[in-house]
Image (spheres, rainbow, N blue to C red):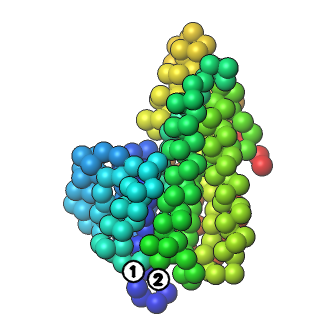
Amino acid sequence: MSSTGVPRTALVTGGTSGIGLAVVRTLAERGLRVFLCARSAENVAAVVKELRAEGFDVDGREGDVRSPDSVRQVVRAAVDRYGPLTVLVNNAGRNGGGPTARITDELWNDVIDTNLNSVFYMTREALTTGGLEGREGGRIISIASTGGKQGVPLGAPYSASKSGVIGFTKALAKELAQTGVTVNAVCPGYVETPMAVRVRQAYAATWETTEDDVLGRFNDKIPMGRYSTPREVAGLVGYLVTEEAASITAQALNVCGGLGSY
Protein backbone atom coordinates (compact mmCIF):
# COMPACT_ATOMS: atom_id res chain seq x y z
CA MET A 1 0.00 0.00 0.00
CA SER A 2 1.34 3.44 -0.89
CA SER A 3 1.42 6.37 1.51
CA THR A 4 -1.72 7.66 -0.23
CA GLY A 5 -3.60 4.46 0.56
CA VAL A 6 -3.70 3.35 -3.09
CA PRO A 7 -2.55 -0.25 -3.65
CA ARG A 8 0.76 -0.49 -5.46
CA THR A 9 1.08 -2.62 -8.58
CA ALA A 10 4.17 -4.56 -9.66
CA LEU A 11 4.94 -6.25 -12.97
CA VAL A 12 7.46 -9.10 -12.77
CA THR A 13 8.88 -10.80 -15.85
CA GLY A 14 9.93 -14.44 -15.74
CA GLY A 15 7.77 -14.82 -12.66
CA THR A 16 7.02 -18.54 -12.60
CA SER A 17 10.25 -20.05 -11.25
CA GLY A 18 13.50 -19.33 -9.47
CA ILE A 19 14.25 -15.75 -8.52
CA GLY A 20 11.22 -14.42 -10.38
CA LEU A 21 8.76 -16.57 -8.45
CA ALA A 22 10.44 -15.61 -5.18
CA VAL A 23 10.12 -11.93 -6.13
CA VAL A 24 6.42 -12.34 -6.97
CA ARG A 25 5.79 -13.96 -3.60
CA THR A 26 7.85 -11.40 -1.68
CA LEU A 27 6.09 -8.42 -3.25
CA ALA A 28 2.68 -10.01 -2.78
CA GLU A 29 3.49 -10.59 0.89
CA ARG A 30 4.28 -6.89 1.15
CA GLY A 31 0.77 -6.07 -0.05
CA LEU A 32 1.48 -5.26 -3.68
CA ARG A 33 -0.77 -6.44 -6.45
CA VAL A 34 1.49 -8.43 -8.75
CA PHE A 35 1.11 -9.13 -12.46
CA LEU A 36 3.57 -11.70 -13.77
CA CYS A 37 4.52 -12.96 -17.19
CA ALA A 38 6.43 -15.91 -18.60
CA ARG A 39 6.57 -17.72 -21.93
CA SER A 40 4.44 -20.64 -20.76
CA ALA A 41 0.74 -19.84 -20.32
CA GLU A 42 0.36 -23.11 -18.43
CA ASN A 43 3.03 -22.14 -15.90
CA VAL A 44 1.57 -18.66 -15.47
CA ALA A 45 -1.87 -20.10 -14.78
CA ALA A 46 -0.48 -22.60 -12.27
CA VAL A 47 1.45 -19.95 -10.30
CA VAL A 48 -1.48 -17.52 -10.29
CA LYS A 49 -3.81 -20.25 -9.04
CA GLU A 50 -1.38 -21.30 -6.29
CA LEU A 51 -0.75 -17.78 -5.01
CA ARG A 52 -4.39 -16.76 -5.15
CA ALA A 53 -5.19 -19.83 -3.05
CA GLU A 54 -2.81 -18.38 -0.46
CA GLY A 55 -4.72 -15.10 -0.47
CA PHE A 56 -2.45 -12.99 -2.65
CA ASP A 57 -3.72 -10.56 -5.31
CA VAL A 58 -1.86 -11.79 -8.38
CA ASP A 59 -2.59 -12.22 -12.06
CA GLY A 60 -0.59 -12.73 -15.22
CA ARG A 61 -0.37 -13.78 -18.82
CA GLU A 62 2.06 -15.41 -21.19
CA GLY A 63 4.55 -13.16 -22.93
CA ASP A 64 7.88 -13.26 -24.73
CA VAL A 65 10.10 -10.45 -23.50
CA ARG A 66 12.23 -10.72 -26.65
CA SER A 67 9.32 -9.38 -28.69
CA PRO A 68 8.35 -5.69 -28.49
CA ASP A 69 4.81 -6.57 -29.60
CA SER A 70 4.46 -9.23 -26.89
CA VAL A 71 5.85 -6.80 -24.32
CA ARG A 72 3.21 -4.23 -25.28
CA GLN A 73 0.49 -6.83 -24.81
CA VAL A 74 1.81 -7.81 -21.38
CA VAL A 75 2.01 -4.25 -20.09
CA ARG A 76 -1.41 -3.37 -21.50
CA ALA A 77 -2.88 -6.46 -19.82
CA ALA A 78 -1.29 -5.48 -16.50
CA VAL A 79 -2.67 -1.94 -16.69
CA ASP A 80 -6.10 -3.17 -17.73
CA ARG A 81 -6.12 -5.52 -14.74
CA TYR A 82 -4.67 -3.31 -12.00
CA GLY A 83 -4.18 0.22 -13.30
CA PRO A 84 -0.87 2.10 -13.68
CA LEU A 85 2.31 0.38 -12.59
CA THR A 86 4.29 1.36 -9.52
CA VAL A 87 7.04 -1.26 -9.74
CA LEU A 88 8.73 -3.06 -12.63
CA VAL A 89 11.03 -6.01 -11.99
CA ASN A 90 12.93 -7.13 -15.08
CA ASN A 91 13.81 -10.68 -14.10
CA ALA A 92 13.40 -12.83 -17.23
CA GLY A 93 16.71 -14.17 -18.47
CA ARG A 94 18.68 -17.16 -19.65
CA ASN A 95 22.15 -18.63 -19.39
CA GLY A 96 24.36 -19.24 -22.41
CA GLY A 97 27.98 -19.53 -23.33
CA GLY A 98 30.79 -21.92 -24.14
CA PRO A 99 34.16 -21.40 -25.82
CA THR A 100 33.77 -18.00 -27.45
CA ALA A 101 35.34 -19.09 -30.75
CA ARG A 102 32.51 -21.61 -31.15
CA ILE A 103 29.53 -19.52 -30.02
CA THR A 104 26.95 -19.31 -32.78
CA ASP A 105 25.22 -16.15 -33.94
CA GLU A 106 21.92 -17.69 -32.88
CA LEU A 107 23.07 -18.28 -29.28
CA TRP A 108 24.70 -14.86 -28.94
CA ASN A 109 21.68 -13.03 -30.30
CA ASP A 110 19.18 -14.95 -28.19
CA VAL A 111 21.11 -14.32 -24.96
CA ILE A 112 21.36 -10.60 -25.76
CA ASP A 113 17.68 -10.45 -26.77
CA THR A 114 16.50 -12.31 -23.66
CA ASN A 115 18.73 -10.67 -21.07
CA LEU A 116 19.36 -7.15 -22.36
CA ASN A 117 17.06 -6.06 -25.18
CA SER A 118 14.09 -7.30 -23.16
CA VAL A 119 15.00 -4.93 -20.32
CA PHE A 120 14.88 -1.99 -22.70
CA TYR A 121 11.61 -3.11 -24.32
CA MET A 122 9.86 -3.75 -21.02
CA THR A 123 11.17 -0.62 -19.31
CA ARG A 124 10.18 1.62 -22.20
CA GLU A 125 6.69 0.15 -22.24
CA ALA A 126 6.33 0.38 -18.46
CA LEU A 127 7.29 4.06 -18.53
CA THR A 128 4.79 4.87 -21.28
CA THR A 129 1.84 2.48 -21.48
CA GLY A 130 2.43 1.39 -17.89
CA GLY A 131 2.28 4.94 -16.56
CA LEU A 132 5.49 4.58 -14.56
CA GLU A 133 7.20 7.65 -16.03
CA GLY A 134 7.29 10.42 -13.42
CA ARG A 135 5.41 8.34 -10.84
CA GLU A 136 6.48 9.39 -7.35
CA GLY A 137 7.65 6.30 -5.53
CA GLY A 138 8.08 4.37 -8.76
CA ARG A 139 10.65 1.60 -8.84
CA ILE A 140 12.47 -0.10 -11.72
CA ILE A 141 14.59 -3.07 -10.63
CA SER A 142 16.47 -5.32 -13.03
CA ILE A 143 18.04 -8.64 -12.09
CA ALA A 144 21.58 -8.46 -13.45
CA SER A 145 24.50 -10.57 -12.17
CA THR A 146 27.91 -10.38 -10.57
CA GLY A 147 28.94 -11.87 -13.91
CA GLY A 148 28.08 -8.52 -15.47
CA LYS A 149 30.72 -6.86 -13.29
CA GLN A 150 33.64 -9.26 -13.32
CA GLY A 151 33.11 -11.57 -16.30
CA VAL A 152 32.40 -15.29 -16.39
CA PRO A 153 34.80 -17.63 -18.21
CA LEU A 154 32.95 -19.50 -20.96
CA GLY A 155 30.04 -17.11 -20.44
CA ALA A 156 30.81 -14.18 -22.75
CA PRO A 157 27.23 -13.68 -24.03
CA TYR A 158 25.83 -13.84 -20.51
CA SER A 159 28.42 -11.47 -19.05
CA ALA A 160 28.01 -9.03 -21.92
CA SER A 161 24.23 -8.98 -21.55
CA LYS A 162 24.30 -8.49 -17.79
CA SER A 163 26.96 -5.79 -18.05
CA GLY A 164 24.64 -4.03 -20.47
CA VAL A 165 21.79 -4.25 -17.96
CA ILE A 166 23.98 -2.57 -15.34
CA GLY A 167 24.99 0.22 -17.72
CA PHE A 168 21.38 0.76 -18.81
CA THR A 169 20.29 0.88 -15.19
CA LYS A 170 22.80 3.56 -14.22
CA ALA A 171 22.05 5.71 -17.25
CA LEU A 172 18.28 5.55 -16.77
CA ALA A 173 18.57 6.14 -13.03
CA LYS A 174 20.36 9.43 -13.62
CA GLU A 175 17.85 10.37 -16.31
CA LEU A 176 14.92 9.82 -13.94
CA ALA A 177 16.53 10.94 -10.68
CA GLN A 178 14.46 14.11 -10.39
CA THR A 179 11.15 12.36 -11.08
CA GLY A 180 10.76 10.21 -7.98
CA VAL A 181 11.42 6.97 -9.87
CA THR A 182 14.44 4.98 -8.72
CA VAL A 183 16.29 2.53 -10.96
CA ASN A 184 18.56 -0.18 -9.60
CA ALA A 185 20.06 -3.53 -10.52
CA VAL A 186 20.26 -6.54 -8.21
CA CYS A 187 23.28 -8.70 -8.97
CA PRO A 188 23.05 -12.31 -7.78
CA GLY A 189 26.08 -14.54 -7.76
CA TYR A 190 25.44 -18.28 -7.73
CA VAL A 191 21.79 -18.89 -6.83
CA GLU A 192 20.16 -22.31 -6.62
CA THR A 193 17.55 -22.18 -9.38
CA PRO A 194 16.58 -24.31 -12.38
CA MET A 195 18.93 -22.13 -14.46
CA ALA A 196 21.79 -22.91 -12.07
CA VAL A 197 21.28 -26.60 -12.77
CA ARG A 198 21.54 -25.97 -16.52
CA VAL A 199 24.70 -23.93 -16.00
CA ARG A 200 26.34 -26.76 -14.03
CA GLN A 201 25.34 -29.25 -16.72
CA ALA A 202 26.93 -27.07 -19.40
CA TYR A 203 30.18 -26.67 -17.47
CA ALA A 204 30.28 -30.39 -16.70
CA ALA A 205 30.05 -31.14 -20.42
CA THR A 206 32.70 -28.58 -21.33
CA TRP A 207 35.11 -29.65 -18.57
CA GLU A 208 34.32 -33.35 -19.05
CA THR A 209 33.50 -33.86 -15.40
CA THR A 210 30.47 -34.39 -13.17
CA GLU A 211 27.85 -31.87 -12.09
CA ASP A 212 28.80 -32.56 -8.45
CA ASP A 213 32.41 -31.65 -9.23
CA VAL A 214 31.27 -28.40 -10.85
CA LEU A 215 29.11 -27.61 -7.83
CA GLY A 216 32.08 -28.19 -5.54
CA ARG A 217 34.31 -25.92 -7.60
CA PHE A 218 31.71 -23.16 -7.59
CA ASN A 219 31.09 -23.41 -3.85
CA ASP A 220 34.83 -23.19 -3.27
CA LYS A 221 34.87 -19.81 -5.02
CA ILE A 222 32.18 -18.35 -2.76
CA PRO A 223 33.53 -17.00 0.56
CA MET A 224 30.38 -18.15 2.37
CA GLY A 225 30.80 -21.56 0.77
CA ARG A 226 27.26 -21.88 -0.56
CA TYR A 227 24.86 -20.68 -3.19
CA SER A 228 22.43 -17.89 -2.33
CA THR A 229 18.71 -18.68 -2.34
CA PRO A 230 16.05 -17.10 -4.56
CA ARG A 231 14.37 -15.82 -1.41
CA GLU A 232 17.54 -13.96 -0.38
CA VAL A 233 17.70 -12.22 -3.75
CA ALA A 234 14.00 -11.40 -3.58
CA GLY A 235 14.54 -9.93 -0.13
CA LEU A 236 16.71 -7.17 -1.59
CA VAL A 237 14.08 -6.48 -4.25
CA GLY A 238 11.51 -6.29 -1.47
CA TYR A 239 13.57 -3.68 0.35
CA LEU A 240 14.18 -1.59 -2.77
CA VAL A 241 10.44 -1.08 -3.28
CA THR A 242 9.99 0.44 0.18
CA GLU A 243 9.84 4.13 1.03
CA GLU A 244 12.99 3.68 3.12
CA ALA A 245 14.90 2.87 -0.09
CA ALA A 246 13.84 6.10 -1.84
CA SER A 247 17.38 7.50 -1.98
CA ILE A 248 18.93 4.34 -3.44
CA THR A 249 19.23 4.70 -7.20
CA ALA A 250 21.79 4.02 -9.96
CA GLN A 251 23.18 1.10 -7.93
CA ALA A 252 24.11 -2.47 -8.82
CA LEU A 253 23.81 -4.32 -5.53
CA ASN A 254 25.30 -7.80 -5.00
CA VAL A 255 23.60 -10.78 -3.37
CA CYS A 256 26.37 -13.32 -3.68
CA GLY A 257 27.83 -14.65 -0.44
CA GLY A 258 30.90 -12.47 -0.89
CA LEU A 259 31.69 -13.70 -4.41
CA GLY A 260 31.80 -10.14 -5.77
CA SER A 261 33.16 -7.20 -3.83
CA TYR A 262 32.41 -4.28 -6.15
Q: Position of residue 27 (x, y in %)?
A: 43, 65
Dividing the picture into quadrants, the one containing residue 101 is top right
- Per the image, label 1 sits on a secondary structure element best described as loop
Q: Residue at x 31, y 73 (%)?
A: 80
Would you say 187 lies left or right of 5 here?
A: right
Label 1: few (<14), some (14–19) or many (≥20) C-alpha neighbours in 10 Å: some
Q: Residue at x 63, y 43 (%)?
A: 161
Give residue 7's mark. Answer: 1
Of 17 and 74, the residue lying toward us: 74
Of 85 and 19, the residue lying toward us: 85
Look at the image and tell me in which quarter the N terminus lies. bottom left
2 or 1: tag closer to the N-terminus: 2
Q: Determine if residue 211 is in view.
A: yes
Amino acid type shown at disc 1: Pro
Q: CA distance from mark 2 to mark 1?
A: 6 Å
Dividing the picture into quadrants, the one containing residue 155 is top right
Q: In the rendered image of this protein, does residue 159 appear above or below residue 135?
A: above
Q: Residue at x 48, y 68 (%)?
A: 126
Residue farthest along the top direction in this orientation: 208
Q: In the rendered image of this protein, does residue 138 appear above or below residue 140?
A: below
Q: Residue at x 46, y 90 (%)?
A: 4
Amino acid type shown at disc 2: Ser
Residue farthest along the bottom direction in this orientation: 4
Q: Position of residue 240 (x, y in %)?
A: 58, 67
Q: Are marks 2 and 1 in contact (CB under 8 Å)?
A: yes
Label 2: few (<14), some (14–19) or many (≥20) C-alpha neighbours in 10 Å: some
Q: Position of residue 100 (x, y in %)?
A: 67, 24
Residue holding disc 2: 2
**Count of marks, rendered view:** 2
Q: Determine if residue 227 is in view.
A: no
